[in-house]
Image (cartoon, rainbow, N blue to C red):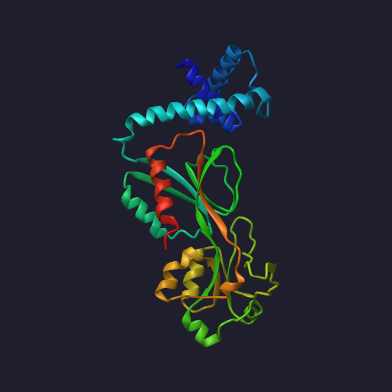
C-alpha cells in the first residue's frame, strides 16, 4: 500500500505541476508528497522530476512512467468501484465546466438534478478553455475539436448556428432573403465575456464566407437574454440551433437564412482519463448523451 500511495502522490504531482497543489488535493503536506516521490525514485533508480525553486517538470523517464501509472490507478479505482457500483447511489459534488454560450437549456440540468438529488451540482460557465485537471473539474462540456491525451471524450452530437427572430418582428420589418439584407435589420449579438469579442455569424455562400455588415442593436453576454430579446420582437439573433429547438416548435421564433449556415460543430463531454468513472460522473455522462442534444 505504501507503493500505491507513492503512485498516487506521483500522478497528482505530475498533473498539478507541483507538490504543493498535489498535497492540497491529497490532503497532505507538500513535503509529504515530495518525500513519497523521492522514495519512489530511489526504489526505481530513476529521476522522475526535474526540480527547481520555481517549477517541477517531468523527466522523459517520468513522462513514460506517468502513462503506466495512470493505467494502474485507473484499474485500481475500477476494481474498487466495481465492487460497490451495484449498490452505489450517485452522490457528492460534481464540478461541471460548460461554455458560457451553451446550447443546453437550464431545464436540462434541472432534470438531471431531479433524477439525482444526492449529487451536488456545481456549474461553471466560461468561454475560455479550462484546465480540467489543474482546476479540479470532474467533467467538461466542450464545442469543437480538442486533443488532450489526459482526457476521455464522448461525442454527444453536432449542432449548427440558427438565425432566428419572432413572427411579429418579421411582419413589421420584413424577412431577410440574403445575408446582405441583415444590414437593414436590428441584430442581437453575443459578446464573449472572457475575450470581449463579438460572436461572428457564420454565414457562407457556396463554401465561401459571406462578407456581411451587421450593426448590433443589442449586445449581451447572456445567451438566455439574447433568445428572450429575439422572442420579444426586438431583432434577429444568431444562436445554437439546439438552444431554440423548443421555441421553433412552438412558433415563438422563426428560423431564417438556413441555407447560408453550413458549418456544424461537434459537442462533447470530457473527463480526466486517470480517473475511473465514478457513479456520479457516469450518471452525468449517460444523462448528457441521452438528453442534452434532444429537442
Residue at the spot 33% in from the left edge and 47% down from the top edge: 116
Point out the residue furthest to the left here: 87
Residue 104 drawn at (x, y percent): 46, 58
As drawn, 215 above or below 174: above
| Quarter location, residue 84 | top left
Q: Residue 179 appears in which quarter of the rendering?
A: bottom right
The foreground one among 258 and 45 is 258
| Quadrant the C terminus occupies | bottom left
Position above or below: 106 against 41: below
How many numbered badges does the structure rendering display?
Answer: 0
**Where 93 falls versus 38 (above or below)?**
below
Q: Position of residue 209 (x, y in %)?
A: 69, 68
Q: Residue 86, how many percent across, how many down?
A: 30, 35
Q: Quadrant of the N terminus?
A: top left
In the foreground, 104 or 193 = 104
- Please state the horizontal and vertical placement of residue 222, each as a whole percent of the image: 52, 63
Q: Residue at x 67, y 70 (%)?
A: 206
Q: Residue at x 46, y 75 (%)?
A: 253
Judging depth in this view, the residue of 75 and 41 nearest the camera is 75
Amino acid at each position: 500500500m505504501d507503493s500505491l500511495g507513492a503512485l498516487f502522490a506521483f500522478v497528482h504531482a505530475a498533473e498539478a505541476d507541483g507538490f504543493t497543489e498535489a498535497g492540497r488535493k491529497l490532503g497532505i503536506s507538500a513535503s509529504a508528497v515530495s518525500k513519497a516521490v523521492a522514495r519512489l525514485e530511489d526504489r526505481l533508480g530513476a529521476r522522475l522530476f526535474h526540480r527547481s525553486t520555481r517549477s517541477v517538470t517531468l523527466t522523459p523517464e517520468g513522462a513514460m512512467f506517468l502513462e503506466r501509472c495512470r493505467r494502474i490507478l485507473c484499474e485500481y479505482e475500477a476494481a474498487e468501484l466495481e465492487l460497490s457500483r451495484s449498490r452505489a447511489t450517485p452522490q457528492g459534488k460534481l464540478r461541471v465546466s460548460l461554455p458560457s454560450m451553451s446550447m443546453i437549456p437550464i431545464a436540462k440540468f434541472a432534470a438531471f438534478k431531479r433524477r439525482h438529488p444526492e449529487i451536488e451540482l456545481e456549474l461553471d460557465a466560461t468561454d475560455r478553455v479550462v484546465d480540467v485537471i489543474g482546476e479540479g473539474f470532474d467533467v467538461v462540456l466542450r464545442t469543437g475539436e480538442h486533443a488532450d491525451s489526459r482526457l476521455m471524450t464522448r461525442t454527444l452530437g453536432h449542432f449548427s448556428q440558427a438565425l432566428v427572430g419572432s413572427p411579429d418582428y418579421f411582419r413589421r420589418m420584413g424577412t431577410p432573403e440574403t445575408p446582405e439584407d441583415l444590414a437593414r435589420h436590428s441584430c442581437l449579438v453575443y459578446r464573449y465575456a472572457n475575450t470581449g469579442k463579438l460572436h461572428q455569424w457564420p454565414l457562407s455562400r457556396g463554401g465561401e464566407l459571406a462578407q456581411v455588415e451587421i450593426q448590433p442593436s443589442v449586445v449581451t453576454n447572456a445567451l438566455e437574454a439574447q433568445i428572450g430579446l429575439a422572442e420579444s420582437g426586438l431583432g434577429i439573433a444568431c444562436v445554437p440551433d439546439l438552444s431554440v429547438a423548443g421555441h421553433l416548435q412552438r412558433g415563438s421564433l422563426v428560423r431564417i437564412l438556413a441555407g447560408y449556415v453550413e458549418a456544424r460543430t461537434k459537442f462533447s463531454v470530457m473527463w480526466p482519463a486517470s480517473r475511473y468513472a465514478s457513479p456520479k460522473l457516469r450518471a452525468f455522462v449517460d444523462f448528457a448523451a441521452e438528453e442534452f442534444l434532444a429537442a
